[in-house]
Image: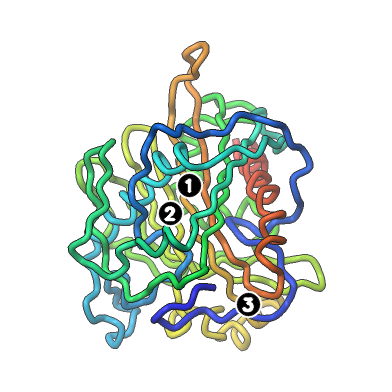
Amino acid sequence: MASTNQTPLQPQADISPAAGEAPPTSTMTESTTSAPNQNPTTSSPPLGNLVRLVPLSLSEIPAHPSIPDSTTGQKPPLAKFIIAVLNEAVSFSDHSVPSKFTSSGTKSSQPSTSKVEILKHTIPSSELAKIPWNSSSSTNSDTDTGTETVAIPRPASSPSGVEENWFVRSSAHENKKAAGTAVWEEFDEGLRVDHNEKEAAYTPELFDANKVLDWDGETAGMELEGRFSGVQMRIYEMCHKLPFPLTTRTFPVLVVSALTGKREAIVVHMPLDISSLPAAFYSNGRNMKEGDSEIKRKKAVLGVYTSIERIRVVPEKTDGKEEVQWSMAVASDASGALPMWAQKIGLPGAIAKDVGLFLKWIDGKR
């Protein structure tokens, strides 16, 4: 964990696999050599300060009736904050990933009829140190889209020696309602709308997706910058069970999702320190007395992850048929005693597995 000026999430000592959208359960078992997904002539836009592994604090997110007044201070307006998050995430997914990430092979993810490509990239501490963490006048310009993301000031900083290890899974699926694939409407409804509850429905290792609070009343019908709609912003505690003798993991996250155009959407997870929030359940230990099952009463071991999930319909390159492109970029730290190099071994297999789990769930709902 990077140390910050805010109250950090405290790692617990045990052996744990890496964490992302789901804790890894296996390493890559199928590896093929493919050309790097890289375009050295394309410049990457500046990094933002929100979609990072450094947890947000309650004082750095928009106001909410359930957040104590003592954390208000200079809290960002809701619309401005959501725009900043979405612009930063779109820029990273659509421009940084193609220009900087390299392919490390493909995996099968049954019952998906499409292969899943794995890409990776490490953002060094020297690059993270250039992020305008505190300057409210700083902007991140995206010359390709013509948009500017106004940086939301944060008291956090990235100390020397800390880096972010990012992995991406990417797959292209025929836009068709059939076994092993799905149509756009199924992807959108299953991944963007109420994302975390849906994830709990198709992920066996996820034993709770506890919604702490939401801004549904404020975001209902919200349209921003003429391109963002269907907006949701919520706080969850995502709880994963691990094989004995490993300890369960809880990931407190702020989740922002939206349509970003016609038949394209994005879902963004950012780590959030909610240990002082009365409405929290696992992060403040309330679960140990009030949990309704043995696993929910276990002491929470807190990990962190940030992720950007992107779905959009595009023409297939060879015959013009429509495909749904689905990608997920994630950086994580499961805490515990397992070194980061060991966590990185397990993460590719875990994120690839999610594709098959989702499509199997979709097929079962038809």
Closest to the observer: 152 or 198?
152
**Amino acid at the residue labelled 2:** Val
* Viewer can see residue 1: yes
Identify the element where label 1 is drawn: strand
The tag earlier along the polypeptide, 1 or 2, is 2
Q: Left or right: where does residue 205 sit relative to residue 130?
A: right
> Going 52% across and 62% down the picture, which residue do you hit?
163
Q: Relative to residue 122, is residue 36 depicted above or below? A: above
Q: Position of residue 338 (x, y in %)?
A: 71, 69
Q: Position of residue 185 (x, y in %)?
A: 46, 34
* Residue that label 3 marks: 301
Disc 1 packing (10 Å; few <14; some 14–19; many ≥20): many
**Amino acid at the residue labelled 3:** Val
Q: CA distance from mark 1 to mark 2?
A: 6 Å
Quadrant of residue 168 in the image?
Answer: top right
* Residue that label 1 marks: 309
> Going 44% across and 47% down the picture, which residue do you hit?
192
Q: Position of residue 13 (x, y in %)?
A: 69, 80
Quadrant in the picture for the C terminus: top right
The tag earlier along the polypeptide, 3 or 1, is 3
* Residue that label 2 marks: 268
Kindly indicate whether the residue at mark 2 contacts the one at mark 1 (C-beta within 8 angstroms). yes
> Going 35% across and 61% down the picture, which residue do you hit?
130
Q: Which mark is residue 233?
A: none
Q: CA distance from mark 3 to mark 1?
A: 25 Å
Q: Relative to residue 329, is residue 80 depicted above or below? A: below
The tag earlier along the polypeptide, 3 or 2, is 2
**Amino acid at the residue labelled 1:** Glu
Kindly indicate whether the residue at mark 1 contacts the one at mark 3 (C-beta within 8 angstroms). no
Q: Left or right: where does residue 284 sit relative to residue 28?
A: left
Q: CA distance from mark 3 to mark 2?
A: 22 Å
Q: Relative to residue 189, is residue 196 depicted above or below? A: below
